[in-house]
Image: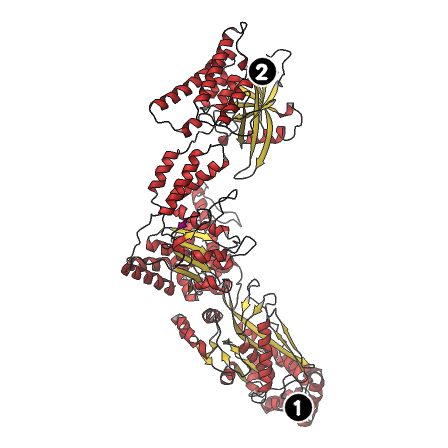
Amino acid sequence: MASSDGIQIPSRLPLLLTHEGVLLPGSTVRFSVDSPRNMHLVSQRLLKGTSLKSTIIGLIPNTRDPEHDTDDLPPLHKIGTAGIAVQVVGSNWPKPHFTLLITGLCRFSVSGLLKERPFVLAEVEQLDKLEQYTTPASQGVTTDDGELGELSEKFYQTAVQLLGMLDMSVPVVAKFRRLLDSLPRETLPDVVASMIRTSNKEKLEVLDAVSLEDRFKTALSMLTRQIDGLNLLQKTRKKSPDNEKRVLSVRKGGVFPGRQFNVDEEDEDDGDDTSVLERKIHAANMPEAALRVCLKELKRLKKMPQSMPESALTRNYLDLMVELPWSKNTTDCLDIRSARTLLDNDHYAMEKLKRRVLEYLAVRQLKTSLKGPILCFVGPPGVGKTSVGRSIARTLGREFHRIALGGVCDQSDIRGHRRTYVGSMPGRIINGLKTVAVNNPVFLLDEVDKLGKSLQGDPAAALLEVLDPEQNHSFTDHYLNVAFDLSQVLFIATANSTATIPPALLDRMEVLQVPGYTQEEKVEIAHRHLIRNQLDQHGLTPQQLHIPQDTTQAIISRYTREAGVRSLERKIGAICRAVAVKVAEGHRAAKTEALVPEGPLEPGDKAAAPPEMPIVIDHIALTDILGPPLFEMEVSERFILPGVALGLAWTPLGGEIMFVEASRMEGEGQLTLTGQLGDVMKESAHLAISWLRANAKTYQLTNMVGGPDPLEGTDIHLHFPAGAVTKDGPSAGVTIVTCLASLFSSRLVRSDVAMTGEITLRGLVLPVGGIKDKILAAYRAGVKRVILPLRNQKDLEELPANVRADLDFVTAANLDQRLDEALAERLDEGLDEGLGERLDDWARDWARDWTRDRSRDWARDWARDWTRDRSRDRARDWARDERLDEGLDERLGEGLGEGLGERLGEGLDERLGERLGEGLGERPQDPLRSKVTQTQVFEL
């Protein structure tokens, strides 16, 4: 034990178990701890305590990795070091841990363990005296020192000799000399041993030397081995200044109680020396300009001490330069036949994309020095744009690397940071080349339309150099500051829309449209790829689950409404999970069947038996698993009143159908527009009104008071459902004209017709975009006829053959030609036939509203026409039941005139009203429900 005048450490110390590094008294070492025991010790004893005793802990070398910490306490070293935690820093990356800066005080031995959880607490015995030493080791040896004095003097002289052999600058040598002169004799071997770069085993030998004489002898042998090694290097003339300097390393911030000094924590990974790095630079086969830069940086590195921060930055830069594939490439597979087979196996449809890849292969066969094309796949989500890029890389036999650009708003992500900044790094292009290690990979720039822009620059502008074949042969990253050739890289960009891509960037890319799939294509994709993939992911086999094609069609039409197949794949995954439960229950029943004794079942019990294989998913099972259908074909149900038309819209997610509804009421000729419409769409509505007013007599349009001007005494309300979704664009003009013409002429719009097109004030129909996506949306909704601008007829060639065969296309150059194609017969022609078809749905309320605004004479004529179209016998019997068989014509006319003038069903008598109510049916429920996803933005 220490003397009474020395400083005592607590008899009970919490123990920090260290795996790497040995703390010697007098030295300061940084430790990183993340094991449960050590984390509890830091959080409960170091972060809460404020006095000196509460911050003194014991460090014991652990023979087992703390990452494998278990309930059993690992074997501990017999001697440890008491220390003061002078700094504690916590972090959660890459996992929760603490970094401790600890200064060693003295040695101790463990007498016994008091507890092991949540941290180790031990009874300790202090082995070293902890006093205020005053005699430095440089003052020489006195006669009273004896053998210990001779050892300390020899150790001091050997340390000075080793310091003189190191190739270090004069200020650094002088600094270490002052440190040796100021250290007390008792702490000299521990401090010098901690400064020398040596193994943990040798440092443990110094720690175990409790006697000061043994400590000097152990440390002196370490110094002697270091001197012998340096002498051997000098004799063989293989002296490496970098290796010599690593014998003794310096780190800022070391703390010794009462004074400052410099030490270094152990680092076993020395890395490549400068000579090896120089050989790598010459072997990288880089261009002459890059080679000159690397050699210049290497020359600077040789002159820098490793303690300088710039030394690590320069070393990282040179490591990156030698790792880049300046001349490494892969050989392209140019077999067109095998390429076509591979593309067909990976993806169904997408003929335009496949043809473009095969064209590139054909040209590469004829011209080997062809630069890589810049392709841009534009289409809705879920159609396979990213996966087809990966298939192209497999087809060519090249490496594939994906760069996600969605949300990137800093141009340094593309070009890199300049090396003058702290934490600088190269851009994503150079990092991708380093990852694939070849200079001709396939780079997929995903979501290029979602690039951002901020004060840090515009990444889209930074891509201009990358995607320009005339410039990317000398692409300069800010971090490299030398040119790199990107001309052999095949760049493929993906986007949902070209509207947000800057024109300059879009001009550098070859845009290939990837439209949505038809229902037949989705069924084929599901049975070729999706079902098989989901079976593999859920551990099922085709012998356990079978999904017929009619079930797949039901999933597509009733449970999904998308251009791609992602939702379809999720629904198939839900079916697989439900079947997996059945299969697992069946296996469990089969295993327990032998353990259950045979006997009669109790009432209400069911025998557990494995399900029959394969499990076939029919429509009933589909409803049980996925629930009620989410989507229904409601197009025909919406066309029960005049003033409803079906338009076609384009969104970045694909085409959609869009209803347009109109109503009128007495007023002052105002037009009301609702549904989150943009300025262009509002202008289309005003154009439609103006054209209809100019052509009101031609189409027999009337207002609320019977005049030819649609706006005279009439207010019009035009509504586009899905009111929370922003809509804009000129292509709703034809749909708005048709909707208003239906309202003013009382003619229904055909329920199987959808339309699109821009209109002018002269009635011309102008072409619009997104025709393919719009027609596919109409095809999915069950539409049979589509009205298009005449100049969009060329776009029909891009449609699948089955879609062109199933739909009837009507093209129009002006509104006069095709307006009648969209409208049905007038409601007052062939009334008995039309009324017979629609009485059950809407006739009673429509007649009530209609007659309220008409004169009594018109109502009487209408009723007489209605009764004349019915058989006279049925009318007489009906009248007789109501006691109207006397004076039938007179009383019927007067009764109908009075009844219809006030309210149809009141005026004749209560029973007549009841009969009319029964004959004309109830008011139909409003079916105007939008099934359009409200996160989409429509462009009509």
Q: Position of residue 304 (x, y in %)?
A: 46, 34
Q: Position of residue 608 (x, y in %)?
A: 47, 48
Principal secondary structure, stretch drawn in magenta: loop
Depth check: give the residue in front, 914 or 23: 23
**On the rendered structure, is 279 left or right of 750?**
left
Residue 915 visible at all: no
Relative height, residue 308 to residue 382 (above, below): above
| Amino acid residing under circle 1 | Trp
Q: Position of residue 693 (x, y in %)?
A: 60, 85
| Amino acid residing under circle 2 | Glu
Q: Quadrant of the N terminus?
A: top right
Q: Position of residue 382 (x, y in %)?
A: 46, 59
Relative height, residue 830 to residue 79 (above, below): below
User: Is label 2 in a helix, a strand or a loop?
Assistant: strand
- 55 in the magenta segment: no
> What label sits on residue 125 in the rendered view?
2
Circle 1 residue: 858
Counting other residues with Cα less than 10 Å from the Cα at mark 1, is it few (<14), some (14-19), or many (20 or more)?
some
Depth check: give the residue in front, 588 or 109: 109
Which label's residue is closer to the chain start, 2 or 1? 2
Counting other residues with Cα less than 10 Å from the Cα at mark 2, is it few (<14), some (14-19), or many (20 or more)?
many
To which quarter of the image does residue 302 belong? top left
> What span is colored magenta in the figure?
477-488
- 483 in the magenta segment: yes
Depth check: give the residue in front, 847 or 401: 401
Nearer to us of marks 2 and 1 is 2
Instruction: Give me the C-alpha separation between circle 2 and circle 1.
Output: 117 Å
Residue 658 visible at all: yes
